[in-house]
Amino acid sequence: MLVSDIVLLDYKRCNRRPFLDFYGDPSEQQAQSEFLLKLREENQKQIGEFLDNISCQEPETPLDNWQVRGKETLEMMEQGAAYILEGVLWQTGLAGWNIPFSIPEPVTLMATPTLLVKKPGNSIFGNWQYEPISIKLGRRPKPEYKVVAAFQAKLLSLIQGSESNNPRLILRSHSESQIQLNTWMSRMEEVLHAVLSMLIARREPEVFISKQRCGLCQWQGFCYEVAQQIEHLSLLPGVTPTRYETLKQLGLTSLEELAHGDSNLLAQEFGKDIASGLQKQAHSTLYKQPLLKSSSSQSILKTIPTASREIYFDIEAEPERNLDYLLGVLIVDHEQQTEQFYPLIAESPEQEEQVWKQFLDLVCLDPHAPIYHYSKYEAETIKRLAALYKTSKKQEQQLLKRLVDLHDRVTRFLILPTENYSLKTIAQWLGFQWRESEASGEQCVCWYDQWLKTRDRALLDAIIRYNEDDCRATYHLKTWLVNFLSFDDNNVEPAKINFDQYKQL
Ligand code: SF4
């Protein structure tokens, strides 16, 4: 059994993942997403920048052949190489690891620190030793990074026969994080014990779908299907892993049990507001009904203005370049019964300012039209671009006052029978369909990056179609919201868009 630092990292994020990697059916795994490959590329770039003035040696054998690459790494350490890039450390057996239970099969431990750096000290090599550096794309020193750093440090100490070493973590912000080894060594051992006992017992951890941690996982499709089949509570908005553990202790593990569970007991555990939110969400999902949280329909309606001309706004951004490259604007004229979409796109990063000015000119043609959008991001971007391109404070404030964030209205006032409150999920529940079925915000980031490299116009067109559909989905949601709130009774079926007509647009 080969247990690597990656296995520990994955386990810390989701204990089910290494189990599926070891024992799952590989045909159920999805291919690596383009976005994940892009992140890997960015990490390689980050490593390249860090090594700019450093001359390092790198083993020649590919990582697939980790035993031989490990031997090469060891030879370099014996020879006293100053820096070793992407070396391999491995040890067969668990001598020195203090495992409190017996393992029925041979175990090999393996680690791949980004860099091994030579330092003065004592080791089996002579009066020098090595320290591991991990270069990670994250902005924060996450616990899983620290577990990996502690694991690499311990394996390295055992291999080079040194007392200990000082692992370092370099993050995307170029900041360096020191690891408190006395704390993280014991946490790492706990994780290693848990991984080994799970793998030996072949105990499959329960599924738990979380957008944050499942988003880039190759088992996502498989796990989602499992969760849907058993109507797992992780598919219910508001059920976090910690809250789920409490619900299990209370014996409330199905939608029905949660919807009709003892509210007082739930309030004692979670507080009144969270308990009531969870029960209403369970109720909404169980009976497939949208519900109001507490305010009256009429008071909510007052927060959603309507006008004869309305603007729907959505942005595509490239976080790595801190660039907002597409400002999509859909202008709906109810009197003239027209809908016109304007994709204001920067074909190169230098055109961002030009696009921002086009946006200002366009939305100022209708100075009283409300601007609907679906996240805080649009307001934040207006502030960022206004400051960057020196737009007057007055114009910025006038623009901000016209914004109507429908995400805020939905999450503040309504409970919907959906698995989450993203625009895509809600609009799809309302019958809206995106023309680019494979598209997502993340996919657009990859497409734009490829457009800059290849100038393939089809990529830009796909992004524009996706962005237009985001604007139209926002329009569809607003129309439904106003209709729904205009009825006293909450039993309103979602309005269905005529998709055949829409596709011809
Ligand atoms: S999809 Fe989610 S639950 Fe399944 S293994 Fe991956 S991270 Fe874990």
Image (tube, rainbow, N blue to C red):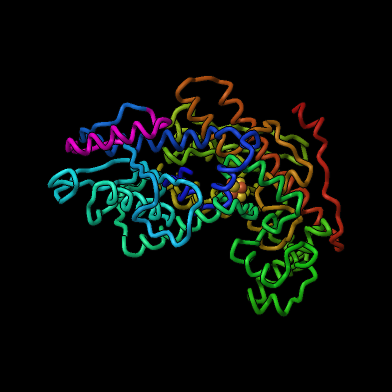
Front-most of residues 391 and 254: 254
Residue 140 appears in the rendering: no
Q: Is residue 138 above or below residue 434?
A: below
Of the pair 412 and 24, the residue shown nearer to us: 24
Closest to the observer, 252 or 394: 252
Q: Is residue 503 visible?
A: yes
Residue 8 part of the magenta-drawn span: no
Decide if residue 350 is on the left or right side of residue 435.
left
The residue positioned 81% from the left and 53% from the top of the image is 483
Q: In the rendered structure, which segment of residues is drawn in magenta?
A: 62-86
**Residue 171 vertical position relative to residue 260 in the rendered view, above or below:** above
The residue drawn where x is 86% and y is 55% is: 492
Residue 463 position within the rendered picture, expressed as x and y whole percent measured from the top left:
59, 31
On the image, which quarter does residue 499 sit in?
top right
Asked if residue 75 lies left or right of residue 363, the reply is: left
Q: Position of residue 451 (x, y in %)?
A: 50, 25
Residue at 56% over, 42% down? 21
Task: Say which of 296 and 200 sits in front.
Answer: 200
Position of residue 444 measured from the top left corner of the image (x, y, whole percent): 56, 34
Indicate the quadrant containing the C terminus: top left, top right, bottom left or bottom right.
top right
Asked whether 65 falls inside the magenta stretch, the response is yes
Seen in the image, is 403 located left or right of residue 474?
left
Q: Position of residue 470 (x, y in %)?
A: 65, 40
Describe residue 47's horizontal placement relative to residue 448 as left or right.
left
Residue 391, by quadrant, is: top left
